[in-house]
Amino acid sequence: MNIVALETESVRTRPPSWQAIVKSAIRDSSQLLRRLDLASDPLSPPVEEQNFPTFVPETWLRRIRPGDPLDPLLLQVLPQSAEDSVVTGFVADAVGDLAAEQAPGLIQKYHGRALLITSGACAIHCRYCFRRHYPYDQAPVSMPQFDEALEVVRKDNQIDEVILSGGDPLMMVDKKLQQLIEMIEAIDHVRRLRIHTRLPSLIPQRVTSDLVNMLKKTRLAKVVVLHINHPHEIDVDVRQAMARLGECHALLLNQAVLLKGVNDDLETLIALSKQLVDNRCQPYYLHQLDRVAGVAHFEVPEAEGCKLIEQMRARLPGYAVPRYVRESAGESSKTVIV
Ligand SMILES: *Cc1c(COP(=O)(O)O)cnc(C)c1O
Ligand code: SF4
């Protein structure tokens, strides 16, 4: 009897899987505001929400300060009416992704590395997202479709790095990811696997032991590029997830986007860099916002960004200062601003 009772208890208290956390995410802005004790709607949701709805997992919600309409984590996910403003210069495909597509889901803009769109899904909807208008419904989802996209890599022995991007590539279940990695490994001239993902900092439970083992096993060198914009995003579970990624001998990097009201402030950027480095993750890029339709209210002028970087340089070791970059369609690399 006792044993049965114990077993029931342990089943009941088992922490939810990352998939369950994705499933139970908040999907409308009024519910989000209610959960944060923000009774009235201070910023009025935009009409456009239907096309890019609110999507916030509990693990993110927990790091938002209740009652604060200006919380930097809330601002990243709460639709605002400003998204509907049409601003000159802000367009659907700001970075020329569609023109750089070599096969459905395979984007190559730069020498030696090709980017594979592996999943249209994300476990959060960042309001400033540069791919919010990308036609994900045309991206590959099945193994034969990935195989077709990888044909471009197979034929070009200059490509020694494959970047898994999305959406978020870690939205794929482990088994599918394993198959995809095996397909990439089978291409002899590919030496590095890069994963661009927000999931480890968003739902740290995603860094499962299966994922860790899979990454440990591959012959490819691993680079994992996280996406963390604000020090409040790093809690104890995220630190643990970062440590586990380090255990698979992955080089850990971070890219952040400079966002008005979120991290356009010297002390915030310094705290972010320090926390990253303390967790063995190097600040790689600080991106100037891509000028995508609906995100103009997040833009920080480049002159301000430059000043922030120069001030960071005066306070931090060189390795803790990210490269401040902009992406311009048709260029052979990201453009370093400073
Ligand atoms: C940003 C980007 C990369 C990666 O650029 P790095 O400078 O190597 O980090 C690769 N492919 C595409 C299409 C990109 O947009
Ligand atoms: S995680 Fe990245 S791709 Fe997904 S919504 Fe956020 S910015 Fe866009």
Image: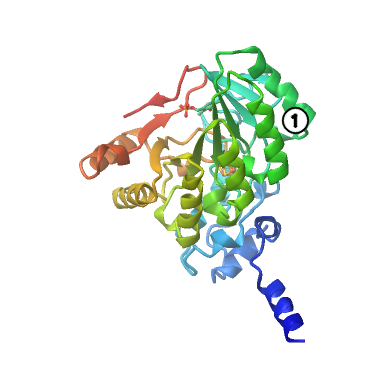
Q: Is residue 53 found left or right of 38 in the rendered image?
A: right
Amino acid carrying label 1: it is Gln
On screen, residue 185 above or below 319: above
Q: Is residue 267 found left or right of 327 in the rendered image?
A: left
Counting from the top left corner in percent of width and height, residue 290 is at 50, 33
Counting from the top left corner in percent of width and height, residue 172 is at 69, 43
Q: Is residue 201 found left or right of 140 in the rendered image?
A: left
**Residue beneath the point at 68% across and 31% down:** 182
Counting from the top left corner in percent of width and height, residue 221 is at 51, 31
Q: Quadrant of ligand 2?
A: top right
**Residue beneath the point at 60% across and 25% down:** 97
Residue 168 in view in this figure: no
- Residue 1, by quadrant, is bottom right
Image quadrant occupied by the C terminus: top left
* Element class at badge 1: helix
Estimate how packed mark 1 is, as few (under 14), some (14 to 19) or many (20 or more) residues with alpha carbons within 10 Å: few
- For disc 1, the marked residue is 138
Instruction: Between residue 153 and residue 215, name the one nearer to us.
Output: 215
Work out which residue is located at the far bottom of the displayed protein and give it: 1
On screen, residue 331 above or below 233: above
Residue 178 in view in this figure: yes
